[in-house]
Image (spheres, grey):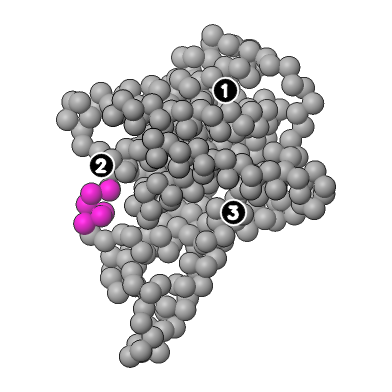
Amino acid sequence: MSDFLIVLLKIASMFLVMALGWVARKRSLITDETGRVLSRLLVDMIFPALVFTQMLRTVNPQVLRESWFVPILGAAVIVIAKVVGQLGMPLFRHKGALATAVFLVAMPNWVFFPLPIVEKLFGDAGVRDVLLCNVGAQLMLWTIGVWTLRGTMSRKMAFKELAMNHGLIATVAGIVIALVLPFTRTLETVAVAGASVGVLSAASVVQALAMLGSLTIPLSLVITGSQLGSLDLADHYPTRDFIGVIVLRLLVAPAITIAIFTAAILLGLRIPEVTRMTTYLIAAMPVAISCSIVTERFGGDTPLAARAIFYSTLGSILSVPALYYLVRLLGL
């Protein structure tokens, strides 16, 4: 019950921070241009700083041997949800929006929403698992995610999107440096007395990056709130497509993901508890905020994406704690 209350409390506090961003947008304290600048700052600088220092702090040869499969779990969450969307959306089908609806079901908010929850529940181990899941999820976004919207995407374009992803670059850099230069794992807490100038210089850089990375969660929530505040939700009529996306994204896809993982574990697959719970939480997340940007860029139904983002995020304040409570209650 205590973990359930932690999840409920954390989501409630996250919504309060998001509400601040929503109010700021409605009062024009955050404009469209300000939001774009903050989003770019978050994605290109602040989040990579968090990823790099987190990898540096937590990765060692033993962790890598034990966690090499976590990116595969992140990819599996997307693939399972996509299949759920493909099979389930025809029940709610609106011909012109089927591809977008499937895409929205497939893409949970796999980084910024689960991060503060797993940090509170599992500490650094949970945060590391979210960031490793991000590797597999990003691969799926720029391959099967875009293919779902467009029907195809050149390998060159997909590779370019991945190669230019600062979060993935920071992940690889952090892992490599942590393995090649093990002493860097302690630079955030290095003792000043007796340390060389080189070590102190490196420590100042790492500690600066850690300070920058600590802005990730609050800033991402404020930006999310401001983005929700800018959405045009004048048409509140609950279309079949919209209902299908919400039901499949918040209820069906997480349930089937958990069922598949549970079956795999019963058949002998070994997944550590923290990794398993983190993956379940990611699977239960609402539609990713970035989906509206991707649908606009690749010709999807952006109004449907906007409404799905808003209402799935709102609905997750109940669905995520409830799902986590059931998982713990049933011992899955």
First of labels 3, 1 by sequence position:
3
Look at the image and tell me in which quarter the C terminus lies: top left
First of labels 2, 3 by sequence position:
3
- Identify the residue at horizontal 34%, vertical 52% (top origin): 125
Residue 204 at x, y = what percent? 47, 79
Contact check, label 2 and label 3, Cβ < 8 Å = no
**Quarter assignment of residue 137:** top left
Front one among 109 and 189:
189
What amino acid is labelled 2 in the image?
Answer: Pro
- Identify the residue at horizontal 80%, vertical 43% (top origin): 26
- Identify the residue at horizontal 76%, vertical 45% (top origin): 23
Give me the C-alpha separation between circle 2 and circle 1: 30 Å
- 308 in relation to 18, above or below: above
Residue 236 at x, y = what percent? 74, 21
Secondary structure of residue under mark 2: loop
Residue most toward the front?
1
Front one among 9 and 186:
9
Q: Does the magenta stretch include residue 12?
A: no
Q: Mark 1 points at which residue?
A: 246
Give me the C-alpha separation between circle 2 and circle 3: 28 Å
Q: How crowded is mark 1: few (under 14 residues within 10 Å), some or many (20 or more)?
A: many
Is the stretch drawn in magenta largely helix, strand or loop? Answer: helix
What amino acid is labelled 1 in the image?
Answer: Ile
Q: Mark 3 points at which residue?
A: 218
Q: Name the residue under label 2.
A: 272
Q: Give the range drawn in magenta.
A: 62-67
Whether residue 326 sits left or right of residue 223 in the image: it is: left
Q: Does the magenta stretch include residue 65?
A: yes
What amino acid is labelled 3 in the image?
Answer: Pro
